[in-house]
Amino acid sequence: MNVTERVIFEQFPFWERGLGAALPAIDAPIIVIIGCGTSYNLAVSLAAVFNAHGRRAIAVPGGEWLRRPQTYLPDPAGAHVIALSRSGETTETVAATAASRAAGLMVTALTCESEGALAREADHLAFTPTHGEEGIVMTSSASLMLLLGLRMAGVAVPPAVVQQAEKLAKTLDERLAGRLAGRSHFVYLGGGAHYGICLEASLKLQEMSQSYTQAFHPLEYRHGPVSLLDERTLVVMLYDPNTLQEEAQLVAELREKGALVVGLGGPGDISLDLDVADELRGLVCLPALQLLGERVAQRRNVDTVTPRHLTKVVKL
Ligand code: F1P
């Protein structure tokens, strides 16, 4: 087992700690969630969850909030910024935090580094320790920041999700063994809060295995992207129970066109039940999707510990 694989499997005791981590309360008419890379993908998912809980929220890449905030929010007065960063050192996120505070906005840092520049710069801190051995690619830290973010959005995260996520990772891994042969194009489909999870699963597999990956809202996939689909495509559908029928119909079409489909919470060539509330599905599925990236990398003999062109912290 390499380091990446081990960190994915060893993340669950950290989740137990995340369930009890102290969190600052956020009371603002609008919440702006910023981050880069994985942290931005988590922001996309969390903004959807905040909105579903009646709290107006938008997700903005750290560099965008730094350079052109007015194109995302014309009047930011009273907004509360949540800045996500594993390292707490990413230049855009730290600089966007400083700029937000200079503009009179409150900032809460959601980070795995309590001593980092981000924690020093922000007004409030939501801190989750992560696996000390985690390499460049974010796995355990991403799950943990998602867990804390969900709790901040008002989602009750029951302890049972820890075992459910671990079990799902093992089950999907077993079910996919021997079925990845010939698959070189990976598509992740999910709506609402699941879309950010799909972005993250897609980025993960891309970073880990240097493969072509895409993420779309389910019905968007028909509007052009489907032209790339063939017998080399693996599709992961993260089902929303409220729109299961139309998503299942899309999956049937994609299977007919040659895709191998993993259905998480609904039908597919490989279909796995998700016995968990819709807003917890992304969290429960994330480790399984991280492991999928590692498995594809292994098939391609790509080292996920030091991936090509990537660094743990991006500084401008
Ligand atoms: C953000 C990030 C990571 C990515 C890479 C470069 O880091 O984009 O998501 O995997 O390591 O940095 P952070 O701000 O969350 O530390």
Image (cartoon, grey):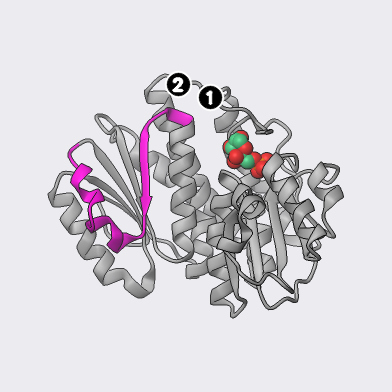
Q: Who is closer to the viewer here, 292 or 38?
A: 38
Question: In the image, is residue 55 above or below residue 97?
Answer: below
Task: Specify the quadrant of the image occupied by residue 124.
Answer: bottom right
Asked whether mark 2 lies closer than 8 Å to ligand 1, one says: no
Task: Please name the residue that numbered disc 2 is placed on.
Answer: 302
Q: Residue furthest left?
A: 256
Task: Specify the quadrant of the image occupied by residue 51.
Answer: bottom right
Give residue 307's mark.
1
Q: Position of residue 154 (x, y in %)?
A: 66, 73
Locate the N terminus and report the quarter of the image it occupies.
top right
Quadrant of the image where one finds ligand 1: top right
User: Which numbered mark, 1 or 2, is in the foreground of this view?
Assistant: 1
Locate the C terminus and report the quarter of the image it occupies.
top right
Residue type at mark 2: give it: Val
Asked whether mark 1 lies closer than 8 Å to ligand 1, one says: no
Does residue 95 appear anywhere in the picture? Answer: yes
Residues at discs 1 and 2 in contact (Cβ within 8 Å): yes
Give residue 256's mark.
none
Q: Residue at x 44, y 37 (%)?
A: 205
Q: Residue at x 69, y 33 (%)?
A: 315
**Which residues are drawn in magenta?**
208-231
| Element carrying mark 1 | loop
Does residue 21 appear anywhere in the picture? Answer: no
The Cα–Cα distance between marks 1 and 2, rounded to whole angstroms, is 8 Å
